[in-house]
Image (tube, rainbow, N blue to C red):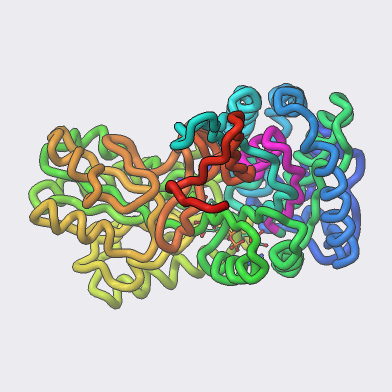
């Protein structure tokens, strides 16, 4: 459906200005280097200054000075800052969600969901601030105690992607702050406005709780600013979320100075659908994961591996469901698919569909542009489903757009081999009512991804689990479980409380 009436760029600019004001950004800085656009129309909202190399250096220096103070503040007191921040996020959730919709093009319910993730991770981090547990181990020597303590690590640099403009930063920041680490954030150059809003809200929480002002520094900039953070030895941890290409550029730079990297890179996520699956439930999970967020999640479902006995029935249901997906203004309550981030993303999608056809694939639905008369500079497009004869190179590549490739299999081993036969390893799922198949998918020789689900789609993770993936996805883990350990350094301590000095391993000396 394309009945939607789009707002004008001027209206969206007014809306953004109002929501920014509500979040504490009185005026948007003017300058050159960064262009804030809205994918709703493709129009320019603001031109902002990019951070210079001197400003980047000063931001890291200030954050490092703040670290010296913050690392000695007891962790539960650090939690009080994050608690206040979470309150402010809740109070401003609608303003922030509007900004996410304006800048990233997410439908309103997903934008609000992204902001909910921020408050969820703040809650989690506040609890964590009293649970940064080390262990005590049994010493092999009498009169000795062996234990470990976790200490703050240092300045955490955060590079974030456009498609989760606020949540990814909050996962890192809420946890880093309770762990005792200041944060220097370089958001995507495509989403500077949401970044200004987040920075203002955190600055207010910092002021309200009397924490060091430089605990958070925002640097608007492009990859050059990102590279400065990668090279800076004062940045103890660089948490980088984005494409595999970005990871390939950043990781060696951080490694060259023996810094720590936390990489959250691209995915190429698949679902296996077996003959025993509840197909109606599977369709709902598949359509949300594949077409939701217009296919622009790192966990978006891109490959469907279906048993040949149910492939036709399932694809028919999916194509039918795709026919019901309203594409259009993401502020409209009934829209389910908003715009792609840019016309370049649409061009990449069109190219992938052409390549798939050349490889013998059949586009069953999707790929058509919409609203080109109302918004010629925007990229509204119907999500596509493509039946493929084989897992060709285009299927093995992450195209950041709503394209779902359908492959068929005969044996479960074949399904797992196809599933794991891509360079990325983020998220995965199996739809089955057969417990053996479910467990085989989750076993050591099953899915090779960091996330493996049963009877739900590949996207839409909760913050309580550790988030991330293997292979080209980069191996990092963020958010819940014990992901906090990446933001701290471990000290192993042996205390001798005896009057003898026995050496480990029975070594004799003196
Ligand atoms: P991108 O790689 O273009 O940019 C991500 C960030 O890295 C931006 O801040 C960008 O300025 C910076 N950057 C890019 N190249 C750089 C370089 N050479 N040196 C230093 N900094 C650099 O990604 P994007 O288009 O914004 O986001 C989409 C990609 O991100 C997809 O591949 C998606 O799968 C991935 N992603 C992964 C996760 C995850 O948690 N695994 C989450 C969201 C997005």
Residue 239 locus on image (x, y percent): 62, 53
Tell me: 370 left or right of 388.
right
Q: Residue at x 30, y 44 (%)?
A: 429
Q: Compared with residue 245, is residue 92 higher up or lower down, i.e. above or below?
A: above
Q: Is residue 85 visible?
A: no
User: From which residue to which does the magenta span run?
Assistant: 169-188
**With respect to residue 198, does 188 lie above or below?**
below
Residue 4 magenta: no
Residue 462 at what x, y percent from top left? 47, 33
Task: Name the residue nearer the viewer: 38 or 259.
Answer: 259
Q: Residue furthest front?
A: 510
As displayed, is residue 22 above or below residue 34?
Answer: above
Count of residue discs: 0
Residue 404: image x %, image y %?
34, 56
Residue 44 locus on image (x, y percent) = 76, 58
Quick one: quadrant of the N terminus? top left
Please tell me which residue lies in front, 14 or 462.
462
Q: In the orientation shown, which residue stands out farthest toward the bottom?
A: 358
């Amino acid at each position: 459906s394309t009945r939607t009436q789009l707002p004008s760029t001027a209206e969206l600019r007014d809306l953004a200005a109002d929501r920014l004001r509500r979040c504490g950004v009185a005026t948007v800085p003017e300058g050159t280097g960064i262009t804030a656009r809205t994918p709703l129309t493709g129009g320019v909202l603001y031109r902002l200054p990019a951070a210079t190399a001197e400003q980047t250096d000063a931001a890291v220096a200030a954050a490092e000075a703040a670290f010296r103070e913050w690392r000695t503040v007891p962790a539960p007191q650090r939690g009080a800052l994050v608690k206040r921040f979470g309150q402010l996020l809740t109070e401003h959730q609608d303003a922030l969600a509007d900004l996410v919709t304006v800048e990233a093009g997410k439908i309103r319910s997903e934008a609000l969901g992204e902001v909910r993730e921020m408050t969820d991770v703040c809650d989690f981090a506040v609890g964590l601030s009293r649970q940064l547990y080390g262990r005590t181990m049994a010493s092999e020597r009498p009169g000795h105690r062996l234990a470990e303590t976790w200490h703050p690590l240092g300045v955490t640099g955060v590079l974030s992607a456009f498609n989760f403009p606020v949540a990814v930063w909050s996962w890192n920041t809420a946890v880093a702050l309770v762990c005792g680490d200041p944060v220097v954030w370089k958001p995507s150059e495509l989403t500077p406005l949401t970044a200004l809003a987040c920075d203002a809200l955190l600055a207010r929480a910092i002021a309200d709780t009397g924490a060091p002002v430089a605990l958070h520094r925002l640097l608007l900039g492009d990859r050059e600013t990102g590279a400065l953070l990668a090279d800076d030895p004062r940045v103890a941890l660089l948490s980088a979320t984005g494409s595999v290409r970005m990871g390939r550029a950043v990781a060696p730079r951080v490694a060259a100075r023996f810094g720590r990297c936390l990489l959250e890179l691209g995915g190429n996520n698949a679902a296996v659908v077996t003959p025993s699956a509840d197909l109606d439930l599977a369709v709902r999970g598949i359509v949300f994961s594949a077409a939701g967020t217009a296919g622009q999640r790192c966990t978006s479902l891109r490959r469907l591996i279906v048993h040949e006995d149910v492939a036709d029935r399932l694809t028919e249901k999916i194509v039918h469901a795709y026919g019901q997906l309203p594409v259009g203004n993401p502020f409209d309550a009934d829209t389910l698919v908003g715009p792609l981030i840019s016309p370049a993303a649409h061009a990449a999608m069109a190219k992938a569909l052409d390549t798939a056809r050349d490889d013998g694939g059949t586009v069953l639905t999707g790929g058509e542009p919409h609203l080109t008369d109302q918004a010629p500079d925007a990229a509204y497009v119907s999500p596509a489903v493509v039946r493929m004869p084989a897992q060709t190179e285009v299927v093995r590549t992450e195209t950041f757009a709503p394209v779902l490739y359908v492959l068929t299999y005969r044996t479960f081993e074949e399904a797992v081999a196809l599933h794991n036969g891509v360079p990325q390893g983020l998220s995965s799922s199996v739809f089955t009512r057969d417990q053996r198949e479910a467990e085989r998918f989750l076993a050591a020789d099953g899915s090779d991804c960091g996330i493996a689900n049963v009877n739900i789609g590949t996207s839409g993770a909760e913050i309580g689990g550790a988030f991330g993936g293997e292979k080209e996805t980069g191996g990092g883990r963020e958010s819940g479980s014990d992901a906090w350990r990446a933001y701290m350094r471990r000290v192993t301590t042996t205390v001798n409380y005896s009057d003898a000095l026995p050496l480990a391993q029975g070594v004799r000396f003196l």
